[in-house]
Structures are given as structure tokens and as C-alpha cells.
Amino acid sequence: QVQLVESGGGLVQAGASLRLSCAASGGTFSNYAMGWLRQPPGKEHEFVAAIRRSGGRTSYADPVNGRFTISRDNAKNTVFLQMNSLRPEDTAVYYCAASSITTKTIISGESDYWGQGTQVTVSS
């Protein structure tokens, strides 16, 4: 059983940056593709970014491409989401996700494990 704990959320103004972290435990971190999804207020979960086990290839949703960067440190069992040029529409609860299969299951919202989420609020 893999446990995921997110941190780094908060309230910022538009144009600011935040860095989210997700610490994993209970499994072999490098065996999992990792990713981030978010749930804006009143909306369904949506894919944000994903990274392969080795960290060699990443995928991004169109609204965040070029502003957000996902990375991982397999030695520290941690995945990060650097968010730059934040916009009010980025306001959401951000969830870390892990998949034992591929990043495709993260993109489709079918991850094996999810964290509890961290709130990101961007004011205009």
C-alpha cells in the first residue's frame, strides 16, 4: 500500500509561483509512474501532469503546458510540481497520484493511489 502526502499549497496572487511536493511511502517509488491532478471548485477532477518511472518523459495538460513543470527525485521518494505564472483558473485542490502501470492511467484518472490533496488558491 502506497501512501502519498502532498504539501506546498497556499494562497497566492496571480502571476506568482508555487512548488508542490508529494512524499511517497510504503512502496518502491521508482516502480510507479507519478502525476498530479486537480479539482477546481464545483468541477470534476482533471489531469495536470505526469512523469514516467525514470523521469525521462513528461506529459502536461494544455492549460498548464509551458507554465508547470513536473519532476521527481527517486532517491527521496518525492515528486514535485513547479507552478509558475499562476492564474485564478488554476485554483483547485491538487492531488498527487501513483500508477503501477503507465502515465496513461494517471491521465485518465485511473491511478492506483491518490493523496489527500492540497489547496491552491490564486487571487486576481
Image: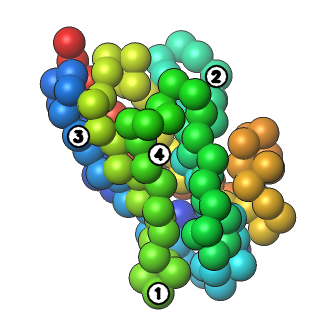
Is 22 placed left or right of 119 in the picture?
A: right
Residue 77 % position (x, y):
49, 78
Residue at 63% of width from left, 75% of height from top? Answer: 54
Residue 109 % position (x, y):
74, 41
Tag on residue 117? Answer: 4
Mark 4 is surrounded, within 10 Å at the Cα level, by few (under 14), some (14 to 19) or many (20 or more) other residues, namely many
Residue at 33% of width from left, 34% of height from top? Answer: 120
* Secondary structure category for the residue under label 1: loop
| Outermost right residue | 101
* Residue on which the image places disc 2: 44
Residue 19 % position (x, y):
30, 51
Query: Do the residues under discs 4 and 3 have CB atoms within 8 angstroms?
Result: no
Task: Please state, as top left, top right, bottom left or bottom right, where the C terminus lies in the image.
Answer: top left
* Secondary structure category for the residue under label 3: loop
Calculate the distance from the C-alpha at mark 4 to the C-alpha at mark 3.
18 Å
Tell me which amino acid carries mark 2: Glu
* Secondary structure category for the residue under label 4: loop
Is 33 placed left or right of 78 in the picture?
A: right
Q: Earlier in the sequence, mark 1 or mark 3?
A: 3
Q: Earlier in the sequence, mark 2 or mark 3?
A: 3
Query: Is 101 in front, or is 24?
Result: 101
Is 70 placed left or right of 100 in the picture?
A: left
Tell me which amino acid carries mark 3: Ser
Tag on residue 75? Answer: 1
**Scheme of colours in the image:** rainbow
Residue at 64% of width from left, 61% of height from top? Answer: 57
Front position among marks 2 and 3: 3
* Secondary structure category for the residue under label 2: loop
Query: Is 118 in front, or is 50?
Result: 50
Residue 69 % position (x, y):
43, 49
Instruction: Reply above or below: 5 against 41.
Output: below
Tell me which amino acid carries mark 4: Gly
